[in-house]
Amino acid sequence: MNWPLTGAPYEVQSRALAAARGQRSFAYFMEMGLGKTATVLAEAALLRADGRLDGMIVICPNSLKKTWVEEARKWGAPVCLAETWPNVSPSTIPVFHRLNMSPGTFFLYAVNYEGMITKRGKAWLDEMLKTFRVMLVLDESVHIKNPQAQRTKVLLKAAGLATFRRILSGAPLVQGPQDLWAQMRFIDGFPANKMNYYAFRNHFCVMGGWQGKQDIGKKNENQLTKYLAACAYRAKKDEWTDIPAKIYVTRDVELTPDQERIYGEMKKGFVAMVSEQRVTAPMVITQMLKLQQISSGFLINAEGKAIPIPGRNPKLQAVLDIIEETTGKVLIFTYFRYSARKLHDAIPGSFLILAGEHDGPDHDHGKSPIVQDLVNVFNEVPLHRVMIVQVQTGKYGLTILGGPGDDRCATTIFYENSFSLDSRIQAEDRNHRIGQDQPVVYIDLVASDIDRKAIRALTKKQNVAEAIIDGLRKG
C-alpha cells in the first residue's frame, strides 16, 4: 500500500494500513512508539485522495492535542487546516464552504474529551459530522470505557454520523473485559452492537465480590479475541522493534515507628492521629488512599491540607539512595501532588511536572514553561538528572529518553502506584520507546501492604489484558 506521507513507513505501519483496508470502522491497538498517529494520518490522506473523506476530528487527552497537529506537520500530511480545541466552534464550520481545498488535502481538528461534553462542543461536533465526510478518531480510546460517563454517551451517539471511525490504544483493556464494550460499540464491533453493557459484562466477566458487582475474573476470552480480530489490529513493541527489555525491581522500604502506629490506627479504626490532628476515612476507598499517604510520609486532612508525619521519610530517602547508586537520568512518578513537591524540594536540579504547575531550574523568573519545553531541556542538558512527574498529568504524549550514552534515562521509580493499569502502562512508555538503547529498570517502592496490594492488582489486570488483547495475531 502506498505511503502518502514524508519518508518511509515502518513495516508495522504498512501492516496496520493493510489490515484496516479503508473499512468504515477499525481499531488500531498499537503500543506506544509504533507510530499509530502517523498511520492514521496516512490512512486519512489515502481516503481523501480517493475522494472518500473531507477531514479528521481527533478526540484525545488534552496533553495530546498539540501532538496531533505537530505530527501532521512533521510527517508532511496534506492538511489544509489544523486546529486544536478551544479554537473551534459552530461558527468555524462555514469557513469550509469558502475554503478552496486542493485535491487530496483534508482538515484536522484535535479536541480533548472534556470539550465534547460541553453544549458548544456537542453542537460543533454534530454539525461537523452532518456537513462533512469525517474520520472520527478516538485516541487513547480507553477514555470511553465507562458506559455511564457523559463523554461515552456523547461519542457513541456521534459515531453513527461519522463516515469513518477509528479507535487508537496500546492498552484498551485496563480493568477487565467490560472496558471493551463502549470501544467496540463505537466501531460496531460484534458483539458490542448486539449486547447492552450488562449482557456484555456478564458474558465475558466473572462477577463476584460485594453484591456480585465486582469483576473477579474473565470467561469466554477466546470468543472475545476472535471478535476483536475481525475489527482490530494488534502490535506490540517487542514484536516490531529492538527496544531493550524492561526490568522490574521491588525496593522494600521500612516504615518509621510513627508511620507504623498511624498506619495501624487508620487500618483498624478508619481514624489516625498525626501531629495532634485527627484524620478520618469515612469509607474504604478513602481509607486506602490514606494508607497510601501514610506509606509516603504524610496525611491529607478534611480541609485538603497535607500533614507531614514527623521524622524522616524512608521512601524519600530510598529515592535519594537510588539516584546515588545509578548512572544516567532518572524518571520518578508519583500519585500525590504532595509527594512530587517534596521530592522536587529534596533533589537539587530536578524538574517537576504537575497539573498546571511545571518547574525547572532554567525556567524564566518563576513563569511556568510549556511541558514539552521542559522535557526538551531535560533530554538535552546533561546537568539535569531527575524528572519528577505526577502520573495523572504526565502519562500521555511525552518522550523522556534523556541523551545518548551516560545521559540516557533508563531508570524509572514508581514512588506510588494507583490501581489504574492505564496510568501504569502509559507511564512506563515515557522512556521505553523507539530511541531507547538501554534496558529500562522500573523500581517499585514498597513500604506497606497497601503498596503491595496495588502492585498485585496491576499485575492481575495486566494478565487479563494480555490473555484477550495480545491474543490477536499480526495481520
Image: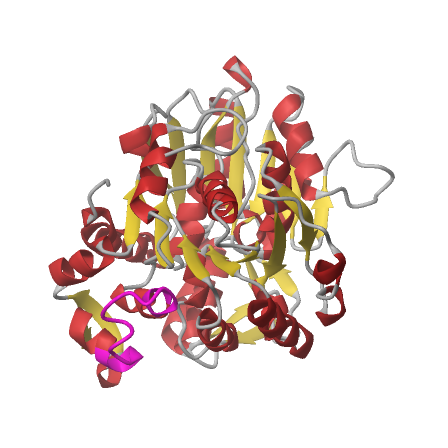
x, y percent for residue 61: 56, 56
The residue lying at 78 percent from left, 46 percent from top is 368
Please say if 401 is above or below 185.
Answer: above
Residue 97 vs residue 429, the one in the foreground: 97
Task: From the top left corner, tell me how far across and down residue 304 is, in percent.
Answer: 64, 70
Horizontal arrangement in the rendering, residue 258 relative to residue 116 (left or right): left
Question: Per the image, is 191 magenta?
Answer: yes
Q: Residue at x 23, y 75 (%)?
A: 200
Give the answer, above or below, for where 278 lies relative to 242.
below
Q: Is residue 389 magenta?
A: no
Residue 171 seen in the figure: no
Residue at left offset 64%, top offset 37% = 73
Q: Give the camera-side residue of 140 and 407.
A: 140
* Residue 104 in sight here: yes
Residue in the foreground of this view, choosing between 470 and 138: 138
Pick out the residue farthest to the bottom: 211
Residue 244 position in % (x across, y down): 35, 24
Specify the farthest residue to the top.
Answer: 405
Counting from the top left corner in percent of width and height, residue 468 is at 21, 55
**333 w.r.t. 121: above or below:** above
Colour convention of the picture: secondary structure
Q: Picture quarter containing residue 189?
A: bottom left
Give the magenta range. Answer: 183-199
Does 124 sit left or right of 202 as displayed?
right
- Residue at position x 23%, y 40% in the image: 474
Quadrant of residue 389 in the image? top right
Q: Quadrant of the N terminus?
A: top left
